[in-house]
Image: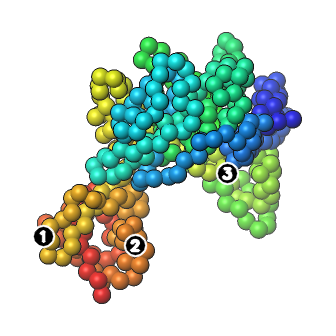
Amino acid sequence: MTTVQKIKEIEDEMARTQKNKATSYHLGLLKAKLAKLRRELLTTSSGGGGGGGVGFDVARTGIASVGFVGFPSVGKSTLMSKLTGTHSEVSAIDFTTLTTVPGTVKVHGAPIQILDLPGIIEGATDGRGRGRQGTYRWYVNTPHRVDRYFLTCPKVARTCNLIFIVLDVLKPLNDKRIIENELESFGIRLNKKPPSIIVRRKEKGGISITNTVPLTTIDHDEIKAILSEYRISNADVAIREPNCTADDLVDIIEGNRYKIPHSVPVSSKDWLNVDELIEKMWEALDLVRVYTRPRGQPPDYDSPVILRHGKCTIEDFCNAIHKEIAKQVKYVIVWGSSAKHARGQKVGLEHVLEDEDVVTIVKK
């Protein structure tokens, strides 16, 4: 039985099983198994019987990556080509983009990688698009029917720092819902923060569960079942947020399932709102530009060192240039928002920089 068939079988069993005290442990096991099978599709070269394909993995370049996700023929390739100057084949027919096409756009001096991902395609099991070659297929349950879709290379989408869902302006809401469900099914959480759940493994003592809020959507049996499926037999679990679900617990165990929000209506053909899109992209990536100023010279505003909020100390700045520089630092002078004085402030390696600060390094 292929991985995709196993996924479908578990989904069917979950749909048939009523949720109650007697079935909570069983449902917990099924949810954990389902998450592991979906991860398997992303980490194996032939999940679900599909071939390895060509051109789906791309080398990471730039300071961050942004993936364009959507159905075929909604303008992903046109927008990507105009933003980056990189040719991504454009056509009015479906399935023009069959591989991940990378490009780069400079935003405020920072190189941002743009990835034009192949479209989410309806009817994949009937052989449309690339069919079985290098693609993964799954099912989306809708209120009225079960449609079949697949997203080529969800593994690439999961590695992006930011995802742009590109929609047809004539039917945006339904398509958005379908795509969000597709991404959710493979652990890509949009517009969400990680739940306040802590799973701390230990060497012995069994499973200890504490909660500072009522457990309304998950119980102890379901928690223990999920931990059991991940072969966690000794751990302290603390739930500090109301309405946490079994999926939330799975997310915490799986790790790295949360992405950054933002959406802007654009027309790449008429260049409508594209500048706003670029600014929203910059805000969402939450980057910090730091300019260097050699002693006795003016600042270099053309080539900033790009850091991330939360990892933008002087030591991070030094390591971004060269890993040996931090060992040679005597002191650093900083001008800008993080400095106490307009004339500059002498700081050490632990000083936290802010966007558009200017830095002079004085070596030993």
Residue at image mark 3: 253
Residue 60 seen: yes
Q: Amino acid at mark 1?
A: Arg
Q: Residues within 10 Å of mark 3 (few under 14, many from 20)?
A: some
Residue at image mark 2: 322
Q: Quadrant of the N terminus?
A: top right
SS label for mark 3: helix
Residue at image mark 1: 343
Q: Nearer the viewer, mark 2 or mark 3?
A: 2
In the rendered image, which quarter is residue 103 located in? Answer: top left
Residue located at (67% from left, 60% from top): 200
- How far across and down, in percent of the image, does residue 189 sit? 56, 39
- How far across and down, in percent of the image, does residue 254 sit? 66, 49
Q: Is residue 45 above or below residue 318?
A: above
Q: Amino acid at mark 3?
A: Ile
Q: Quadrant of the C terminus?
A: bottom left
Residue located at (44% from left, 13% from top): 170
Residue 354 seen: no
- How far across and down, in percent of the image, does residue 75 sit? 44, 25
